[in-house]
């Protein structure tokens, strides 16, 4: 789980995000580990030959609402279908667990991730300018009816 925090911190810092972003990732991972709700929540780390290539989480937002969190694919693994497979794993898990909706929070500048979400059937439901993490960002909320 430390790899998830570390790689988010490293990769997002390269894109100009400050350490507050890594702190948010650490809070998400910490909450996941603290709750240990394996019935309703799950984390996947994609790997090949012992090398971690990507990750994603599903956490419980409400009894019938799941939230996709912390999707990341290593730069050298992008374009291999890993991001789509991780998103699909989340959707399949959420459906199996009886969730009726899945949400996610992202930033408008994360164009590749946004394309993956849209391809998986998520719809943009809100966006709001939110300068944070040392950048001028636009927060977006996406939803998928399950």
Image (spheres, rainbow, N blue to C red):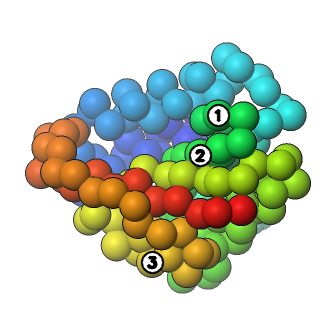
Say which residue appears at 46% left-offset and 59% top-offset: 142
Label 2, on which residue?
Answer: 67
What SS does tag 3 mark?
helix
Q: Is residue 138 above or below residue 37?
A: below
- Is 24 situated left or right of 52 in this image? left
Q: Mark 3 or mark 1, which is nearer to you?
A: 1
- Toward which corner of the image does residue 122 lie, by quadrant? bottom right
Label 3, on which residue?
Answer: 115
Looking at the picture, how far across and down is residue 115, in whole percent? 45, 77
- Is 21 situated left or right of 53 in this image? left
Front residue of this view, candidates 88 and 146: 146
Q: Name the quarter where the N terminus is drawn.
A: top right
Front residue of this view, candidates 144 and 37: 144
Front residue of this view, candidates 41 and 22: 41
What SS does tag 2 mark?
strand
Q: Is residue 27 above or below residue 141?
A: above
Say which residue appears at 61% left-offset and 35% top-offset: 61
Characterize the local packing of mark 1: few (<14), some (14-19) or many (20 or more) Cα atoms within 10 angstroms: few
- Outermost residue, top direction? 34
Characterize the local packing of mark 2: few (<14), some (14-19) or many (20 or more) Cα atoms within 10 angstroms: many
Identify the disc placed on residue 62.
1
- Is 141 situated left or right of 120 in this image? left
Q: Is residue 18 above or below residue 55?
A: above
Q: Name the quarter where the C terminus is drawn.
A: bottom right
- Toward which corner of the image does residue 110 lie, by quadrant? bottom left
- Is 90 situated left or right of 78 in this image? right
Q: Mark 2 or mark 1, which is nearer to you?
A: 1
Say which residue appears at 19% left-offset and 39% top-offset: 132
- Distance in Å between CA atoms under marks 2 and 3: 18 Å
Tell me if label 3 and label 1 are in contact, CB under 8 Å: no
């Amino acid at each position: 789980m430390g790899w998830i925090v570390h790689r988010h911190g490293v990769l997002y810092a390269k894109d100009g995000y400050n350490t507050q972003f890594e702190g948010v990732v650490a809070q998400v991972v910490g909450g996941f580990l603290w709750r240990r709700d394996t019935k309703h929540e799950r984390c996947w780390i994609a790997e090949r030959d012992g090398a971690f290539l990507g990750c994603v989480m599903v956490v419980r937002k409400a009894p019938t609402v799941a939230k996709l969190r912390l999707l990341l694919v290593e730069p050298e693994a992008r374009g291999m279908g890993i991001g789509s497979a991780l998103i699909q794993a989340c959707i399949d898990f959420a459906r199996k667990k009886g969730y009726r909706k899945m949400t996610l929070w992202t930033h408008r500048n994360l164009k590749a991730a946004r394309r993956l979400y849209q391809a998986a059937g998520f719809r943009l439901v809100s966006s709001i300018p939110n300068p944070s993490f040392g950048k001028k960002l636009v927060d977006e909320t996406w939803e998928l009816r399950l």
